[in-house]
Amino acid sequence: MPTIVIPTSPFDGQRPGTSGLRKKVTVFQQTHYLENFVQALFDVLPDARGKTLVLGGDGRYYNRVAIQTILRMAAAKGYAQVLVGQSGILSTPAVSAVIRRHGASGGIVLSASHNPGGPDGDFGIKYNVANGGPAPEKVTEAVYARTQQIREIHICDSADLPLDTLGNYRIEGMQVSVIDSVADYAAVMRDLFDFDAIRKLLASSFRLRFDAMNAVGGPYAKALIEGELGAPVGTVVNAVPLEDFGGLHPDPNPVNAEDLIAHLFADDAPDMGAASDGDADRNMVVGRKFVVSPSDSLAVLAAHATLVPGYKSGLAGVARSMPTSTAVDRVAKSLGIACFETPTGWKFFGNLLDAGKATLCGEESYGTGSSHVREKDGLWAVLFWLNLIAVTGRSVESLVRGLWATHGRCVYSRHDYEAIPSERADALMRDLRAKLPTLAGTTVAGQSIAMADDFAYTDPVDGSVSRKQGIRIILVDGSRVVFRLSGTGTEGATLRIYLERHEPEPSRQDLPAQEALRPLIFLAETVAQVRAHTGMDQPSVMT
Ligand code: VG1
Ligand code: CO
C-alpha cells in the first residue's frame, strides 16, 4: 500500500467561509475536488509525524466516501494516529471534545451544518486546531492560497476500512482507531452539570421534547437525555442521523422546526422543547407556548450560570457576535464582568476562551457555548437549561421573563433574503457602504442615527484585525440595524438584516417582534433599498 502521487490542477472558489468550505454535494463529487482541498490543508500544516488527527462528520450524504479518502491521505501525510467516530459520526462539539481530551493536533469535521443534505444538498469540510476550535483566518487563508497552486495529491493506495465497529486498524504506519462517537463528549457533560438534579426533574411530571431533526444530535441526546438522565423513551424524536436528514432542513429555528413549535403550542404541550442542527452545534430552546430568542437564551444562561456546577465560581467574561442582541451585555454589566463583541463565526471566540477572558459565548443564529470546548454546543445548551430549571423550579418562560423584568427586553429579529444573484447583493452592500460616512447625525425614516460603520474587529489577544464584518446603523436610542452577507450559503448570496430594539416598558414587551420592530424594518428598506436591489418583496425567512 505505498503512497502514490496523483497529478491535479486547482479548482476555483475553494475559500472557506464563515465555517469551512461548503458546496453542493455535486461540486464535491468532482474528481479530486475533496482531495485538492485536503491536500492544500495538509500542505500548510506542519509535519504530522507522531501526531493525532480527529475525523468525523454529521453523517450526511458523502460523509462515508469522504472519510475513507481522508484516512488514506492522512496516512500519506504521515500522521501517527487518526481517531475516527464510529460509522464516521462525530458532532461538531464532539470533535472539539475529542481533540482536547486526546491531545490531538487537530481535527477535520465533515459537515455543512444547518444546510440541507442528500445527493442534491450540501456538503462541507472544516479544520479545527489543537485547542479544539475552528482554524483562525490566517490558517484558512493559507489553505485557500494553497488550493490555487495545488499540483499533486498524496494518497495511500489502500482499501476502505470497516468503520461501523469499534477497533484499531492500520494504513501503512498510521493507526486508525474507531472510537465511540459519544463517550468523550458525555464525559465532558458529566463534569459540568448536576446530573442528579436533572434526573430528578426528568423523573417528575416535567416533560421535554428534543427534536434532533434526523441529524447527528440524535445519538448524543439519546445517550444522555434518555440513557443517562432517564427521560422516557420517545423524549428524543427524529433521533437517527439520516444521509438526507429525512428531507428536513436541520436548522433549528421556529420556521424549519415547525413540528416542534406545533407540539409546544398544543394544549397538551410539554414543558420544554429543544432542537439541534445538522452537526449539533446549534440549539433552539422553546418553552410551553413560548419561543426563546437565542440572544435571550445566552443572557439567561449568563445570568444564572453560578447555579450550574461547572460555572459555580462565576464567569470570567462573556462574548457575543456583533449582530447578536445586547441582552447579554446588560447581564454582564450587572455581574461586573467583561463582554466582548466579535465578528460572526465561532472562530473569533477561540482566543478569548483560550486566554480565559470569556467563559460563555453566543450568536443570534441559535449558537451558544462555553470554555468546555471550542465550538458552540447544542446539547450542552439544552442541559444547561435543564439544570437551571431543575435547581430553580422555574419554567422556561419564567426565566426569560425574569431577564426582561430586570434588564428590559431586547426585541430582536433576523430577516434573510436568500439566493439573491451575487452581483445584486454586492451592489446593495456597495451602495450602503458608500452612504455610511454621511449617515451619522441625520434622521432617516424618522429615526435619528447616532453612528454608522462597517464593523472591524481587533482581536484583543493576538491583535489580528478583521474588517468588513457587517454594516451597522445604530440609533440614538441604541436600536440597531445590521446588514451582512452570509458566508455559509451555496446558492447565490444571502443577505441578512438583523434588527434590535430595547424595550424597558413591561406593558409593551409582549408586542409581536415584527410589529415592535416596524420602524427599524422601514429604516432598513429606506437606507438600503432592499426591494429594488433584491427584487424581493419580503424576506425568505424571518426568525
Ligand atoms: C451562519 C451564522 C453564524 C454561524 C455560522 C456557522 O453564518 O450566521 O452565526 O456561526 O452560520 O454555523 P453566515 O455567514 O451564514 O451568517 V453552523 O451551525 O452553520 O456551523
Ligand atoms: Co451547525
Image: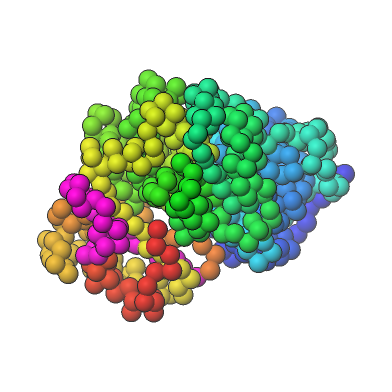
**Is any atom of residue 42 visible in this view?**
no
Can the viewer see residue 175?
Answer: yes
Which residue appears at 55% of the width and 29% of the height?
203
Taking the spot 54% from the left edge, 44% from the top edge, the residue there is 209
The front one of 252 and 138 is 252
Res. 348 image quadrant: top left
The stretch of residues the image draws in magenta is 492-520
Q: Coloured how?
A: rainbow
Total tally of numbered discs in the picture? 0
Picture coordinates of residue 411, whole percent (x, y): 28, 52
Left or right: 330 in relation to 489:
left
The location of residue 54, given as percent across then percent down, is 66, 37
Q: Is residue 506 magenta?
A: yes
User: Which residue occupies 15% across, 63% down?
Assistant: 447
Outermost residue to the top: 313
Residue at position x 75%, y 59% from top?
Answer: 7
Figure check: 365 above or below 460: below
On screen, residue 468 versus residue 501, left or right, reads right
Q: Nearer the viewer, residue 22 or 291?
A: 291
Residue 278 horizontal/vertical position (percent): 58, 51
Q: Quadrant of residue 308?
A: top left
> If the image is split into quadrants, where does the C terminus sit?
bottom left
Residue 257, position as x, y percentages in the image: 51, 55
Q: Does the magenta portion include 340? A: no
The quadrant of the picture occupied by the N terminus is top right
